[in-house]
Image (cartoon, helix red, strand yellow):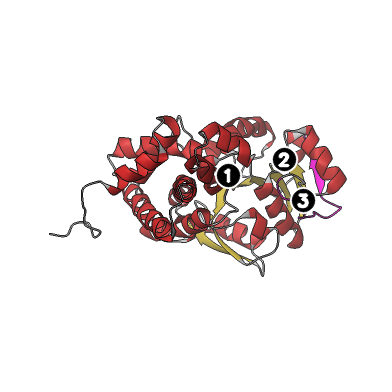
Amino acid sequence: MSSITVIGTGSWGTALAHLLCKNGHRLTMWSFFPEEIEMYREHHQNTDKLPGVILPDDVQYTNDLEEACRDKDLLVVAVPSPVLRSTAASMRPYVRDRQMIVNVTKGIEETTLMTMSEILEEEIPQANVAILSGPSHAEEVGRDLPTAIVAGAHDRETAVTVQNIFMSSVFRVYTSPDMRGIQLGAALKNVMALAAGIADGLGYGDNTKAALITRGCAELARLGKALHVQEQTVYGLSGIGDLIVTCASMHSRNRRAGILIGQGHTMEEAMKEVHQIVEGVYSAKAGKTLADRYGIDMPIIQAVHAVLFENKPAAAAVYELMQRVGKDEIEGWD
């Protein structure tokens, strides 16, 4: 049994807390917002973002970061990507040397192009940082539906420790050393999910969705090669696995936001309607910057960026994608 704090009380943090409790661990949950802590103390659930997933009575709740971090075997960071750096900086004084932190936040920092684990390592250099990612909607993990995911770490011992803590009869965990590749897929699949939702909002069909998922994976593979990501990662759980589930499911906040944009809503209206952080909006900027920096052809990423930030009509963006010059599917064919 481990003593664990989940930093962040959104739907994903709550679902993982539910899983870890069922695995027999002692849980504390931290939130920046006092009203969220009061909600959990009264209802033992996130009544807004994950209703019905009830946490045990012995779970502790706090707004005090020192209390949250002190004497814990593991810290699970599940805050939205825009506030991860500031949260990590606040945690720093309370994290002991080699204390294990598992990041489950998905995204790429817009200004630095750093992954979430790189931010944690910069802000909390004494920590031992690992990651957990893959096709795993909180709504289904909270209902104990079978899920597979991947734990990434710099060394096998850390990855296996994370694997053993999280793995259960309904939550299968694989291990990988490719932390950058795992996080690249985790961030950019949200941009592809926005594209898939926009296509749905425009009234397009299954053919369009299949094309977006497949060609989106090709874009990830091209960028991954430039960033020295392992090819197996692109075609693994955190790559194509997460891409499929996020583009196809209505659990996906990014797809739901995309649907609204495709129907004519502005980005701001869509984010307000979804009522959660839409990570793909932030990752679209980072994805375009990465494509430009490394000279990688990423037309879907660039089209989503144009719709979100350059006032391009969604239908026009799709038309331009379809009208690009014909290409080979297998690159390098003479």
Numbered range of the magenta stretch? 49-63
Q: Is residue 236 visible?
A: yes
The residue drawn where x is 62% and y is 67% is 146
Q: Is residue 294 left or right of residue 73?
A: left
Q: Which residue is mark 1?
A: 105
Q: Quadrant of the C terminus?
A: bottom left
Q: How many numbered callouts?
A: 3
Crowding near the residue tagged with mark 3, few <14, some 14–19, many ≥20 C-alpha atoms within 10 Å: many
Rendered location of residue 288, percent (x, y):
37, 37
| Element on which disc 1 rests | loop
Rendered location of residue 14, percent (x, y):
71, 50
Q: Which residue is mark 3?
A: 27
Distance in Å between CA atoms under marks 2 and 1: 18 Å
Task: Specify the amino acid type for callout 1.
Answer: Thr
Q: Which residue is mark 2?
A: 69
Q: Is residue 201 left or right of residue 223?
A: right
Task: Specify the amino acid type for callout 2.
Answer: Cys
Rendered location of residue 66, percent (x, y):
75, 35
Q: Depth check: give the residue in front, 70 or 241.
A: 241
Residue 77 quadrant: top right
Q: Is residue 55 magenta?
A: yes
Q: Nearer the viewer, mark 2 or mark 1?
A: 1
Q: Earlier in the sequence, mark 3 or mark 2?
A: 3
Q: Is residue 86 magenta?
A: no
Q: Depth check: give the residue in front, 99 or 17.
A: 17
Q: Nearer the viewer, mark 3 or mark 1?
A: 1
Task: Specify the amino acid type for callout 3.
Answer: Leu
Q: Depth check: give the residue in front, 33 or 96.
A: 33
